[in-house]
Image (tube, grey):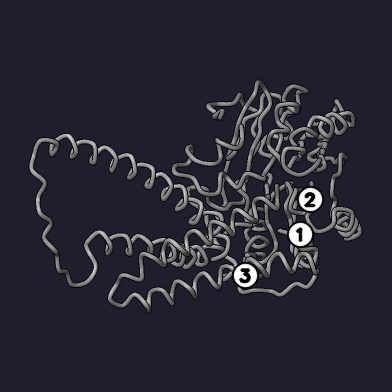
């Protein structure tokens, strides 16, 4: 499957380059536009080849984030959309052309055949100019999108959520939690962003800092500075985290070892119980079970294994990178589950329309089943540089004992 995706991407690059070059060559100054197109495609293909070659050889060259953003935006957003539109346009144009020819043939069937008059024209036709303009749009749109996205990578919001839980012990009314997910420390994570996460989180003066996975984006080279950031976070009751899929891409065992050796409480189908205001609070965390569809299949295994550790006298909070763990947790009566992974849908047409609800049952914000609640964070970092209607965030949760009012579902 992976090889098929890579071959498809290269094929789409070749198709676009061939199609666009043919449209640009008819322009008066077409050679300049064609050279610009060739330079753009050379950068894209060169980065694409280097990215996979570096992973296969283990030789990592740090490319400027803006170049990497061009690669991601082009291959994961602009090019697929353009290929779909080009294919749909070609089909629609073919059908429309066939219909016009059929109608024209019927109208002229009984009319004399006109004598063609040679036409002399200077320069390209209006249709050729229009198509050349269309060919230039995808690279220009990619460049403009990257320019705007790079200026927003270090920006995030603090999202306040007041969550009423019927089973919350009275002593925990007003408990404050900083929910941090998907930092993705890596090529799109600047030192300024990590400093801002520490500063904004510590300003909240919370009882708990709970992190729900994807501390790093890919390489374990980034783990030391990520852990340095984590160790600077302050909470009255403590800090706990679970792992995410990106944390394990480079080396699962080494990631887990380094985090545990650093003293950061990483919960791997495990729990920690602490006392806050004289009330026992139990934080449970599940492992990431696999990649892709395999993880969804293994969620029940890890949730059930972890819930066997529940303390019935403690208020329980479950940390799960994937939000689909919530259903089992709610069935078991866990009052609060925190998750990330979805990035709020990343690129949404509206806050409720886009990849989020297409890919996930729960994708952003608070949800409720019975007396159990889930909060899904959009994440504070980025593996993909563009966000639309899914802003990066730290979620500031305040728990209340009163009955819940109007938490949305779906």
The secondary structure type at the circle numbered 1 is helix
Residue carrying label 2: 239
Q: Is residue 162 visible?
A: no
Query: Could you tell me how far apart the alpha carbons at marks 2 and 3 are, in whole angstroms?
Result: 38 Å
Query: Could you tell me how far apart the alpha carbons at marks 3 and 1 are, in whole angstroms?
Result: 32 Å
Residue carrying label 3: 47
Image quadrant assignment for residue 397: top right
Q: Earlier in the sequence, mark 3 or mark 1?
A: 3
Q: Is residue 376 left or right of residue 215?
A: left
Compared with 27, 253 (above or below) is: above
Q: Quadrant location of the C terminus?
A: top right
Q: Is residue 358 visible?
A: yes
Image quadrant assignment for residue 48: bottom right
Please state which of the two labelled residues, at mark 2 or mark 3, is closer to the viewer.
Answer: 3
Closer to us: 396 or 358: 358
Crowd class of label 3 (few under 14; some 14 to 19; many from 20; radius 10 Å): some
Query: Could you tell me how far apart the alpha carbons at marks 1 and 2 are, in whole angstroms?
Result: 9 Å
State the residue at coordinates (77%, 36%): 318
Compared with 74, 240 (above or below) is: above
State the residue at coordinates (70%, 47%): 1
Residue carrying label 1: 230
Q: Earlier in the sequence, mark 1 or mark 2?
A: 1
């Amino acid at each position: 499957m992976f090889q098929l995706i890579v071959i498809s991407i290269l094929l789409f690059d070749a198709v676009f380059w061939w199609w666009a070059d043919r449209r640009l060559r008819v322009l008066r100054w077409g050679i300049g536009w064609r050279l610009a197109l060739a330079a753009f495609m050379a950068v894209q293909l060169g980065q694409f080849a280097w990215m996979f070659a570096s992973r296969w050889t283990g030789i990592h060259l740090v490319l400027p984030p803006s170049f990497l953003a061009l690669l991601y935006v082009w291959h994961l957003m602009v090019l697929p959309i353009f290929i779909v539109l080009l294919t749909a346009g070609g089909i629609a144009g073919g059908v429309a052309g066939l219909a016009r020819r059929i109608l024209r043939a019927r109208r002229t069937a009984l009319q004399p055949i006109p004598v063609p008059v040679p036409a002399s024209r200077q320069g390209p036709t209006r249709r050729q100019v229009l198509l050349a303009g269309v060919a230039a749009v995808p690279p220009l749109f990619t460049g403009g999108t990257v320019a705007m996205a790079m200026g927003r990578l270090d920006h995030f919001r603090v999202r306040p959520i007041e969550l009423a839980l019927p089973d919350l012990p009275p002593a925990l009314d007003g408990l404050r939690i900083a929910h941090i997910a998907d930092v993705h420390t890596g090529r799109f994570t600047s030192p300024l962003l990590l400093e801002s996460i520490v500063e904004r989180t510590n300003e909240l003066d919370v009882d708990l800092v709970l992190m729900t996975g994807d501390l790093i984006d890919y390489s374990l080279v980034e783990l030391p500075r990520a852990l340095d950031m984590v160790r600077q976070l302050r909470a009255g009751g403590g800090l706990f985290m679970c792992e995410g899929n990106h944390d394990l891409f480079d080396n699962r065992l080494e990631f887990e070892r380094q985090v545990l050796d650093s003293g950061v409480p990483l919960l791997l189908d495990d729990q920690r119980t602490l006392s806050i205001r004289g009330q026992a609070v139990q934080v449970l965390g599940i492992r990431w079970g696999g990649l892709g569809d395999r993880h969804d299949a293994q969620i029940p295994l890890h949730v059930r294994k972890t819930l066997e550790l529940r303390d019935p006298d403690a208020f329980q909070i479950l940390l799960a990178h994937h939000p689909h763990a919530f259903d089992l947790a709610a069935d078991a009566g866990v009052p609060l589950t925190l998750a990330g992974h979805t990035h709020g849908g990343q690129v949404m047409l509206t806050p409720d329309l886009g990849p989020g609800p297409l890919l996930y049952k729960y994708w952003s914000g608070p949800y409720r089943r019975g007396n159990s609640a889930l909060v899904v964070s959009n994440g504070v970092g980025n593996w993909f540089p563009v966000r639309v209607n899914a802003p990066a965030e730290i979620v500031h949760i305040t728990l209340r004992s009163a009955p819940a009012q109007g938490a949305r579902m779906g």
